[in-house]
């Protein structure tokens, strides 16, 4: 194996590790529900999210923090409220693809 091929395989593996981590982070029912809500709404507050999902606020905040750290979500502070939205439109595409798998 040449050195260039080894570097290419190593780089590809590192990229796949990052994508695998993204899928692991998405792979929770509450997180998928958050993605679904944000796919239908441009942005939502923590209160809107936990009320709609009928979960406790600390649970919602925990999942939002994980998703933001993984760059699935972004947040914008407006006054006293933090609004969450999908960080990349491809997240919605991934979610839609998941719904179409039988």
Image (tube, helix red, strand yellow):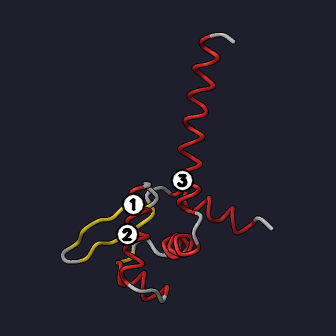
Q: Which residue is mark 2?
A: 84
> Mark 2 to mark 1: distance in Å?
9 Å
Q: Residues within 10 Å of mark 3 (few under 14, many from 20)?
A: some
Of marks 2 and 3, the one in the foreground: 3
Q: Quick check: marks 2 and 3 in contact, CB under 8 Å?
A: no
Of marks 2 and 1, the one in the foreground: 1
Identify the residue at horizontal 25%, vertical 77% (top origin).
81
Q: Which residue is mark 3?
A: 22
Front in this rendered view, residue 89 or 48: 48
Front in this rendered view, residue 31 or 99: 31
Q: Quick check: marks 2 and 1 in contact, CB under 8 Å?
A: yes
Tell me which corner region of the image, top left, top right, bottom left or bottom right, holds residue 60: bottom left
Tell me which corner region of the image, top left, top right, bottom left or bottom right, holds residue 75: bottom left
Locate the N terminus by quadrant. Answer: top right
> Mark 2 to mark 3: distance in Å?
18 Å
Sequence-first tag of 2 and 1 = 1
Compared to residue 26, the image places residue 45 above or below, namely: below
Q: Quick one: SS at disc 3?
A: helix
Residue 77 lies, in percent from the top left, at 24, 68
Q: Quick one: SS at disc 2?
A: strand
Tell me which corner region of the image, top left, top right, bottom left or bottom right, holds residue 13: top right
């Amino acid at each position: 194996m040449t050195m260039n091929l080894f570097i290419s395989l190593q780089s590809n593996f590192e990229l796949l590790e990052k994508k695998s981590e993204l899928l692991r982070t998405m792979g929770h029912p509450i997180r998928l529900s958050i993605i679904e809500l944000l796919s239908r709404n441009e942005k939502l507050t923590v209160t809107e999210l936990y009320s709609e999902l009928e979960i406790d606020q600390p649970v919602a905040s925990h999942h939002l923090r994980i998703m933001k750290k993984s760059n699935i979500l972004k947040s914008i502070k407006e006054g006293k409220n933090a609004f969450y939205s999908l960080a990349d439109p491809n997240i919605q595409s991934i979610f839609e693809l998941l719904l179409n798998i039988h």
